[in-house]
Image (cartoon, rainbow, N blue to C red):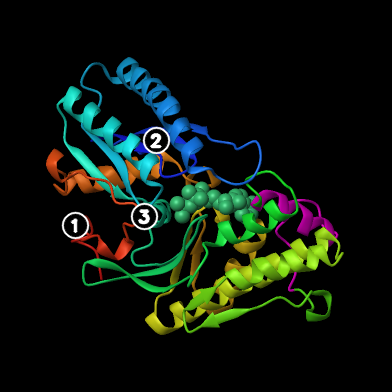
Amino acid sequence: MRVLGIEGTAWCASAALHDAEAGSTLIESDPYEPDSGGIHPREAAEHMSEAIPEVVGTILDHAEAKYGPDAVDAVAFSRGPGLGPCLRTVGTAARSLAGALDVPLVGVNHMVAHLEIGRHESGFSNPVCLNASGANAHLLGYHDDRYRVLGETMDAGVGNAIDKFTRHVGWTHPGGPKVEAAAAEAAGEGVRTGTTGPADAADLLELPYVVKGMDFSFSGISSAANDAYDAGEPVEEICFSLQEHVFAMLTEVSERALSLTGADELVLGGGVGQNDRLRGMLAEMCAARGAAFHAPDPRYLRDNAGMIAVLGAKMAAAGDTLAIRESHIDPNFRPDEVPVTWRDDEPS
Ligand code: ATP
């Protein structure tokens, strides 16, 4: 089974070919990089309509050169969640391509794909998943043929909360890597060492830490970080404290989810998962309780079509395909709306 995946929920126009038998995935991506500010929905949609044909064309050329004219067995696309105008471009491209190639169409939930790529890479049977992405933040666990939302942000996505602060200080999008670098400077470490030990509370600026059960909130922390910057606190110190607070919240709720579900595996998903400090905290927490932890390769953490093609192949193999008339996009598509058809033979 070879599946061509298309991703374009917000900033990353991406296509991929996943060969399930060979276990190989080729990804071609073209990110939208705003000159200033955050992601402008209209500019992002314009980027998609220019970049999607290019990345799909590159992958198709590769597929046909390697496998011949019947290279693609199915076309998978991100149905949501995401920005409506971007999703519409992706949906139209996927429907046209599936029609032209005369192959089935598969509609993939982008958040479930963030989760499944970690399960696929790790071989874990039934992990809890922390999705730490730009526009979202969820804890997911599997039960009764669905991924259930165990906890989630009550307002901003985790990456968006960090980016809101970096916009305030005038840094270009995406802000997460810049915050990571500045925090590492404040910690007296080289960038991306991931070895910074637990912060001493006395070293931290006081910022809101809001966890309620397995839900959490980030809106207050972005505003407080902005206020600290306006009050003259050094930006590196704010970045350090921001990371320590946000990632401690995510680690606390992940530990609670492991504890309450009895699961002993945790996978990480989403673009913020590229942060070494977050990975370090989660790895340390899992090691302390004897749980296994897997963080996918960074190319599979940020938005990418590889994860869409990998999950698309599992769905297509399970016969979980879409008729064109049912293939509408859904900007608010939640992960717990997806009937999981591809895990029938696995423990629940
Ligand atoms: P979603 O997947 O929820 O639709 P998204 O489309 O914004 O979100 P992702 O690619 O999952 O996309 O994540 C992008 C986010 O990751 C941005 O907010 C960016 O600042 C953040 N990010 C990227 N690298 C890092 C890093 N090293 N540390 C922290 N955050 C990071």
- Residue 156 point in image, percent of width and height: 52, 64
**Amino acid at pointer 2:** Thr
SS assignment at label 2: strand
- Residue 58 point in image, percent of width and height: 41, 21
Quadrant location, the N terminus: top left
Is the residue under label 1 in contact with that under label 2 (CB below 8 Å)?
Answer: no
Of the numbered discs 3 and 1, the one sitting upstream in the chain is: 3
State left or right for residue 258 relative to residue 318: right
For label 2, the residue is 25
Residue 341: mark in rendering: 1
Q: Which residues are magenta?
A: 176-198
Q: Is mark 2 within 8 Å of ligand 1?
A: no
Marks 2/1: CA–CA distance: 22 Å
- Judge whether residue 340 can be spotted in this image: yes
Of the numbered discs 3 and 2, the one sitting upstream in the chain is: 2
**Amino acid at pointer 3:** Glu
Residue 116: mark in rendering: 3
The residue closer to the viewer here, 274 or 213, is: 213
Q: Is residue 194 magenta?
A: yes
Marks 3/2: CA–CA distance: 15 Å
- Residue 150 point in image, percent of width and height: 39, 75
